Amino acid sequence: METEVVHTNFKSEEYFINMGPQHPATHGVLRLLLTIDGEIIKKVEPDLGYIHRSIEKMCERDSYQQIVHLTDRMDYLSANINNEAVCLAVENALQLEIPERVKVIRTIIGELTRISSHCLWWGVMGMDVGALTTYFYGFRDREMINDIMEETCGARLTMNYNVPGGLMLDIHPNFVKRVKDFIAHFKTKLPEYDRLLTGNVIFKKRTVGVGVLSKEDAISFGASGPVGRASGYSCDVRKHHPYSAYDKVTFNESLKTEGDTYARYLVRIQEMWESLSIIEQLIDIIPEGEHRVKTNAVIKLPKGEYFQKVETARGELGVYIISTGTKSPYRLKFRSPGFSNLSLLNHIAVGGKIGDLVATMATLDLVIPDIDR
Amino acid sequence: MSYFSDIYEGIKTLLTGMSVTGKYFITSRKGAITQQYPDNRETLKMFDRFRGEVIMPHNEDNEHRCTGCQKCEIACPNGTIEIIWDRGIDEETGKKKKKIDQFVYHLSMCTMCGLCIDVCPTDAIEWGQNFENSVYDRTTLTRVLNEPNSKLMPGVED
């Protein structure tokens, strides 16, 4: 005789599905526990920890010079900006006077990193919604930036180019020419991005009105970067708390008010234009001077607490150092943009379809090592 | 009415996108950036700052510049560098002097951060251009960088 199984945990028409940890649309080892009714998403529960390397704990063991290279491995697509955050925090604590040359070069390289990150995001964004061509176009232009980085910094992804006190090496003699070539090249390619994807009717149908995040929710969830700005929340650290050479350049903070997936897409495209304009303003006026200030071989921060935030390609990265006066921090906390942006996924994906979830996640631009650390 | 305008809009954006891809379909040979690796191994040249692996250059007399000060060992975040040193007798002054026995480099643990080369006071180590490091056994990635019977270059002091 058959006995009827009575579910007590959830309603019989809802079911669980695992998205990840090896799903290509999660861009890494993120596992999403989806509760689904048919194809309507009822609940999204991110499960983290698959790529946790305890970077914050390792920082308590390392010297301040060694910490910098660990931040490469957090948000690897904006490695240089992460390096800069730690270096700025240490330099502020030591009250070092940083040469203008270093500030300008850091800004240029930071903006190049942002363009490179957004190129990759644009490529995989198209791929996530089914347009494979964009992937190759995005990577083609990113390749030029990678070459610039490799020539000047020595590595393509994990550069470790910043050190507390300046830059590890001076810029390569070819740097200026290569960057100018890139600007000229990319100015002809960015309109192609628009023609290929931005106006496409299929892409618009997949993105407009999907995953809407209101301004109030963006603020209360701690959204930052393009995710917050697409909802009308003016949160650009470069604008509100300028660091390095951002107070010398004029640029617009790209803001949209719709807060949907398409708005987040447009904000990032607009940011690429702004980054190009920032680089253009600075590339001809790199001041002469030292590329590095001499620091002690063993850096000991004065006792106290230090905080520095920067704008990475994903949003606001905060570095919080508690020092007890020894050669390593007592505690070092990273406020990573990806973690806060992931926290609002459940809020904006509920009620949508699985396909919408993929499109929404693509514009949150999650980098999982940044979330797990 | 919007049904027809949707069709028109769909075809228009499709053709706009295809004009981009079509352009590259015709001119793809000219702008190709793909490198034919490994067929181009002979002509492939990495950038001079490229971080492949740490090497210790020797001159023709089998002499290196490493004094064994161990600054690189302290700077390394991962314990990649291990210097086994000894005290030898300096021939000129007759005093005891530190010298390296083996400069052990574990490439399998190296993150290519460059701190060791940055901190080296005598420029004894530098970046090599080799990047083909796949092996079947990771123990083969542990290397002794100083050549057998090599000596410190005269005149190098830290």
Image (cartoon, coloured by chain):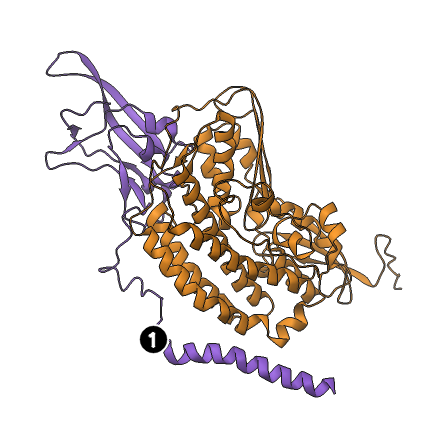
Examine the rendered structure and indicate whether residue A94 appears above or below residue B129.
Answer: above
Image hue for chain B = purple
From the viewer's side, name the closer residue of A116 and B75. Answer: A116
Q: Residue A337 vs residue B66: left or right?
A: right
Q: Position of residue A67 (x, y in %)?
A: 48, 33
From the viewer's side, name the closer residue of B143 and A287. Answer: A287
- The image quadrant that residue A351 belongs to is bottom right
Circle 1 residue: B29
Where disc 1 sits, the SS reads: loop
Residue B134 shows in the view = no
The amino acid type found where label 1 is placed reads Arg
Other-residue count near label 1 (Cα within 10 Å), few / some / many at <14 / 14–19 / ≥20? few
Q: Position of residue A294 (x, y in %)?
A: 36, 28
Q: Chain of mark 1?
A: B
Q: Position of residue B152 (x, y in %)?
A: 17, 27
Examine the rendered structure and indicate whether residue A4 appears above or below residue A113.
Answer: below
Residue A39 shows in the view = yes
State the residue at coordinates (20%, 30%): B65
Q: Which chain is orange?
A: A
Q: Residue A333 vs residue A257: left or right?
A: left
